[in-house]
Image: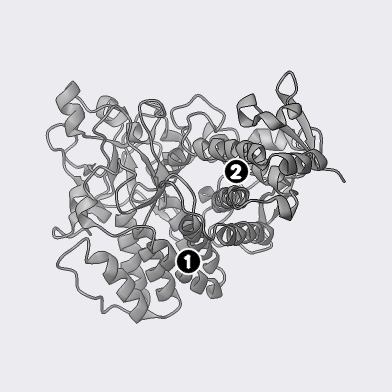
Amino acid sequence: MKKIFLLLITAAAFTSCSEEFITSDLQNIVTDETIAELSAESPEALLNIASSFDAGTINNLRTYGVGGTTGHNDYGQKSIDLMMDIMSNDMETLESNTGWYMTLYNYTGRVQNLNATSVIWNYYYEIIKGANQTIGLIGNVPEESLTDDLKYVFSRAKAIRGYAYLYLIQIYQKGQPALTDLGVPIIDPTADVLNGPGFGRLTVQDVYNQIETDLTEAFDGLDGYARPDKTAVNQEVVAALLAKFYLVWGTIDNSKYQKAIDNAIIAQGAGSLSGSDLLDGFQFIYNPEVIWGADLNVDTNSYYASFISQMQSFSAQNQSNYGTTLGYPGQLAHHRTIDPRLYAEIKSTDIRSNWFGPDNGYIKAGQADQFYNYKYYDNTDFEADYIYMRVAEYYLIEAEAKAEMGDDAGAAQALYNLMTTRDSSYTLSTNTGQDLIDEIRLNRRIELWGEGFGLLDMKRWGVGLTRDYVGSTHPQNSGFFNLPAGSNSFTFQLPEDEITLNDAITTADQNPN
């Protein structure tokens, strides 16, 4: 069956030798045959189109409104990272009941008729749509017409599609699912998505297979590719995604941990551990620990609808320039603070202890019992870069996977390699078994606080939510409660619109309330 694509193209995407492919309204229905003709006549034109799709999809990772709303909790991957942490044990949110993230804190945002689940679902499927445009465009180009650059664009699109499915399956399924459990819909890039039938929920196994295929093919296809900067996806970024994926799969299949280790070690080569660079506010993509991110500036930032606007409680530069810290915490006291139990575990000799502390005298409506977040700050007006991956995560993945496989010595060494750049007094751990796993998990929670792992790790580890305890500083509002490990509340429901509008999904396919 002939595949059909609706391509929205601009004259700038083509060279002069391919002008015959442009219609007067700049819209064209393009079949396999015309793509093959274009690739033979002008590979440069095809590359320009594919590259524009690729760039647009990458830009959508950090763009306001891709999740389909005008809310200030809809600004790409970092908005979802914050959602995952706000639902965890380790982050408190001091915003009012009408704050942008309050429905996440009180766990109502996960239900089918609330905004948050729609933002997440729409965001990742928009990313998949963009990746599928590129994959569909290049997928049937004859092998002899494929240049290296076309292969690289095709492989990057597969990597981004695998990334999106990886997050979807973690958010919309249990933390330790059976492979036969319902997964998420997989969208066929050759399908007529405008007029054809919808796509139903496949199994977890199907989704895992798709992620593995996308990422392994992307890794192989990017061999030899030298990226221009850290905003681009290269082999090491794909290895990092594979390490994340196999760590997740290892939870239900121990044999996958070795692949997590192998790919984590490759990913480590994309950056360098540097304790002295941990106090820069996490605002610069060129930090040596950063593997992949978005480079924001005055033209590409989204001001109050941004990660730094939702996170920073104190910026010395803002304070000097404006007499306040810009953003929701600094101007409205919607602070993101660390749970006191985790704060108490950070040694004074650990440089990460500087990430948190009591009110320094500049905190908006500061409270004496809270430990505020100084990890994130911005020297500009919301131009702080977005960091998607840091090299530290991959030392922690190596350590955790080795510990889960029973390689205590290897796990302790991987943890030591990280920790000696954080704490000069740290010595090689003598813990073994579950005690070593617990030490690794503790340092993962400290190291990656605010980077989007809180709820996903709780699900993966089988940990419950505990906010109501003696000494708790969690606000005693609608989010002050406990949930047992494995609670249905840790899994998001599909958006109501998806069930209403998708003829392949019914109410019987919905996740539990």
Label annotation for residue 493: 2
Q: Residue at x 47, y 66 (%)?
A: 263
Judge the density around disc 2: few (<14), some (14-19), many (≥20) Cα neighbours within 10 Å.
many
Colouring scheme, one of rainbow, by chain, secondary structure, one colour = one colour
Determine whether 79 is above or below 176 in the image: above
**Number of on-image labels:** 2
* Nearest to the observer: residue 288 or residue 389: 288
State how far apart marks 2 and 1 are (Cα). 31 Å
Q: The C terminus appears in which quarter of the rendering?
A: top right
Answer with left or right where residue 486 lies relative to residue 213. Answer: left
Answer with left or right where residue 472 lies relative to residue 493. Answer: left
- On the question of residue 276 being in view, the answer is yes
* Nearest to the observer: residue 408 or residue 153: 153
Task: Tell me the residue that label 1 is attached to.
Answer: 263
Q: Residue at x 44, y 74 (%)?
A: 404
- Coordinates of residue 224 in the picture (x, y in percent): 52, 59
Q: Secondary structure at mark 2?
A: loop
- On the question of residue 481 being in view, the answer is no
Q: Amino acid at mark 2?
A: Gln
Q: Secondary structure at mark 1?
A: helix
Label annotation for residue 217: none
The residue sitting at the left extreme is 361
Frontmost of labels 2 and 1 is: 1
Q: Amino acid at mark 1?
A: Asn
